Amino acid sequence: MSENKTAETTAQQYDNYPDPDAIVHFGDVSEELVELVEETLETSEFLSTSRDDLPETTLLVEAVGNE
């Protein structure tokens, strides 16, 4: 039962953000690792990341359509 409660709490935590394709939460890691992953994802022409008003170890990832 606590697993469902945890999933529900996690989902509520992101209710105020746009609907991303993925939410990447790193836990207790260095800011440098988060920045490395963010920069790596941003090199893809198919992905976009953002971190606006999020905890420093969380990324929102969205697929970018071919334009």
Image: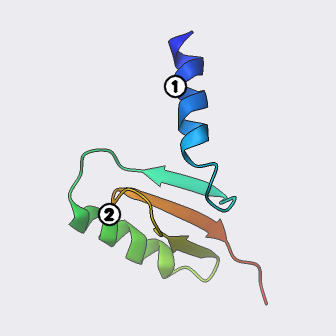
Q: Give the mark nearest the N terminus, 1 or 2.
A: 1
Give the residue at the far top of this rendering: 1
x%, y% of residue 64? 70, 77
Placement of 46 over or under 25, stated as above or below: below
Q: Where the C terminus falls, by quadrant?
A: bottom right
Q: CA distance from mark 1 to mark 2?
A: 23 Å
Placement of 46 over or under 17, stated as above or below: below
Q: Residue at x 48, y 70 (%)?
A: 52
Three-letter amino acid code of the residue under disc 1: Thr
Residue behind mark 1? 6
Residue behind mark 2? 34
x%, y% of residue 4? 60, 19
Q: State the mark number for residue 32.
A: none
Q: Residue at x 67, y 58 (%)?
A: 21
x%, y% of residue 1? 57, 9
Provide the secondary structure element on which disc 1 rests. Answer: helix
Q: Tell me if 34 is positioned left or right of 11 in this view.
A: left
Three-letter amino acid code of the residue under disc 2: Val
**Depth-wise, is mark 1 or mark 2 nearer the camera?**
1
x%, y% of residue 10? 53, 37
Provide the secondary structure element on which disc 2 rests. Answer: helix
